[in-house]
Amino acid sequence: MFKLIEKLEKEHILSKEELVALIDQHNNTEISNFLFKKAREVKEYYYGKDIFIRGLIEFTNYCKNDCYYCGICSSNKNVARYRLTKDEILSCCELGYDLGFRTFVLQGGEDPWFNDERMVDIVSSIKIKYPDCALTLSLGERSYESYKLLKDAGADRYLLRHETANPEHYSCLHPQKMSSEHRKECLLDLKSLGYQFGTGFMVGSPYQTIENLAEDLIFIYDIQPQMVGIGPFIPHHETRFANFSGGTVELTIFLISILRLILPTSLLPSTTALGSIDEFGREKAILAGANVVMPNLSPTQVREKYMIYDNKVGTEDDALTSLENIKRKIESTGNKVVVSRGDAKTTN
Ligand code: 5AD
């Protein structure tokens, strides 16, 4: 197994069978520690002790989709829906800028109210006010034309998790009108438009197999995103998966380390979901090669309405508290939070 990890470090990819064999060892402490060390070394080779921060603005919890795992899915009638106004979004950016954020991430459900015209206005207003900041969008599936308009308006990056690369598994997690193929087409559109783009998946989602995870890793290697966000699946009590078990910290951080070796210069977040299932989940991810954290900049009064899973951490905090909590955690790992846009490096 150690040889396999060295091979992965050198060649950045393994066969599906090899990946399955490796992932299968995620509960083996000796192998995990060896893998984490390699991943940390690669992260430090490119980024030193720097950890980048992104200010997350959850600006709408309306969603037209009905993903089976998600707490804000359209069929959940117990969610108090909200939309931030353009002015409220700009105030979040102002607060974030003063706290040292140089990347803002606008994340929301697929909310048709935020059509191209409204989004272009918001994107261009943010970029005019903060030309030194990167703007990341995470608005789900849109048309090529829409992605192009948003890019032309100034958006720099786009996050769209593929959720699972396996079409059958995808159909176990989503209603029929959504498809893995379309999700992948969107990612290729984003890439061809010149966005720095990110994808990702949930770890331990219902019906997921180790083979599925190997397929996710191969898909990610093939499309070469700049960012990959993964976090454990956490059941939400008002979804059909309420009684399924969630993903584990061990498997999630094992996969983060593998991703660091597959994409050495990538930006890998230590996600809120990890911090929600384990008090030290975020620290463990950093020590396994993650190099991004995304503290919440959303106004406190809307946070508890953006419950995509149960027991999400930080829903009572304000922006400063979220940032300080996360900074303390990062520093405890011997790393440091830096004020910069935090673009991905290139290997050549
Ligand atoms: N548990 C963990 N992650 C979830 N997401 C949605 N619902 C859940 C859940 N119950 C993730 C999806 C989505 C991202 C915004 O949050 O991967 O892309």
Image: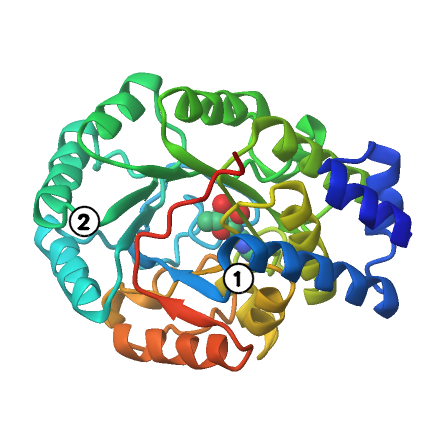
Hey, which quadrant is residue 200 in on the image? Answer: top right
User: Mark 1 near ligand 1 (CB under 8 Å)?
Assistant: no
**Disc marking residue 34:** none
Drawn side of residue 151 relative to residue 95, left or right: right
What residue sits 35% from the left and 58% below the top? 54
Q: Which residue is mark 2?
A: 132
Q: Position of residue 333 (x, y in %)?
A: 56, 77
In the image, residue 179 sits, relative to residue 33, either above or below, namely above
What residue sits 13% from the left and 50% below the top? 130
Question: Crowding near pointer 1: few (<14 within 10 Å), some, many (20+)?
Answer: many
| Disc 1 + disc 2, Cβ < 8 Å | no
Q: Which residue is mark 1?
A: 270
Drawn side of residue 211 relative to residue 114, left or right: right
Q: Position of residue 13 (x, y in %)?
A: 74, 35
Drawn side of residue 4 relative to residue 49, left or right: right
Q: Position of residue 154 (x, y in %)?
A: 20, 34
Q: Is residue 81 visible?
A: no
Q: Nearer the viewer, residue 119 or 240?
A: 119
What residue sits 60% from the left and 61% below the top? 234
Q: Position of residue 173 (x, y in %)?
A: 62, 39
Question: Crowding near pointer 2: few (<14 within 10 Å), some, many (20+)?
Answer: few
Query: Gap between marks 1 and 2, in whole Å?
Result: 24 Å
Q: Is residue 156 visible?
A: yes
What residue sits 62% from the left and 68% below the top? 287
Give the amino acid at mark 1. Answer: Ser
Q: Comparing marks 1 and 2, which lies closer to the viewer?
A: 2
Give the amino acid at mark 2. Answer: Asp
Sequence-wise, the earlier of marks 1 and 2 is: 2
The colour scheme of the drawn protein is: rainbow
